[in-house]
Amino acid sequence: MAAKVFESIGKFGLALAVAGGVVNSALYNVDAGHRAVIFDRFRGVQDIVGGEGTHFLIPWVQKPIIFDCRSRPRNVPVITGSQDLQNVNITLRILFRPVASQLPRIYTSICDDCDERVLLSITTEILKSVVARFDAGELITYLPAGQSLLLQLPQ
């Protein structure tokens, strides 16, 4: 009699472990300041952006791609020429973050390392165009060391 009880408890425990594993693989968490985009193996990247919290997905069919949407700093060192053809060594510190509603488009066109691929080249070109408007003397008097300069990146 005791053997049958232990056998039924073992079967119940095994079934519970399998069910728990399936439920656990169907859940994913999105931390604060992050957003998720779902990649479906059959339909591709979904247009819905998941917010913070716990969400459901279809196991082995869907996969969450988590993006950090907090503002992050980045230092971009550039050696460029001024208006009077003097070499200028300047470092620009930028704060950037992706627009949460555009994450599916960002992931499909750029992938998840947009700061490495696009941000550095755009920032470098804009900084060179701004520095080229001034001569070396104006840069020294206009922008002392440690002072900030606001640049607006194109949309």
Image: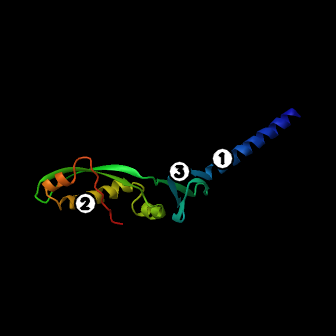
Residue 49 appears left or right of 27: left
Q: CA distance from mark 1 to mark 2?
A: 50 Å
Give the structural element (helix, strand or loop) at label 2.
Answer: helix
Residue 55 appears left or right of 36: right
Frontmost residue, 129 versus 64 = 129
Q: For label 1, count other residues whose C-alpha is less than 10 Å away and answer few (under 14), some (14-19) or many (20+).
A: few
Residue at 41 percent across and 58 percent down: it is 111
- Asked whether the beta carbons under mark 3 and mark 1 sit within 8 Å of each other, the answer is no
Q: Which of pointers 3 and 1 indicates the residue nearer the eye?
A: 3
- Where residue 69 appears, x then y in whole percent? 46, 55
Q: CA distance from mark 3 to mark 1?
A: 25 Å
Q: For label 2, count other residues whose C-alpha is less than 10 Å away and answer few (under 14), some (14-19) or many (20+).
A: few
* Three-letter residue code for mark 1: Gly
Q: Earlier in the sequence, mark 3 or mark 1?
A: 1
- Where residue 56 appears, x then y in whole percent? 62, 56
Residue at 40 percent across and 50 percent down: it is 72
Please name the residue that numbered disc 1 is placed on.
21
* Three-letter residue code for mark 2: Glu
Please name the residue that numbered disc 2 is placed on.
125
- Where residue 23 appears, x then y in whole percent? 66, 50
Give the structural element (helix, strand or loop) at label 3.
Answer: loop
Residue at the far top: name it.
2
Quadrant where the image shows the N terminus: top right
Q: Earlier in the sequence, mark 1 or mark 2?
A: 1
Quadrant where the image shows the C terminus: bottom left
Q: Is residue 3 above or below residue 126?
A: above
Please name the residue that numbered disc 3 is placed on.
32
Frontmost residue, 125 versus 17 = 125
Residue 22 appears left or right of 83: right
Residue at 56 percent across and 58 percent down: it is 62
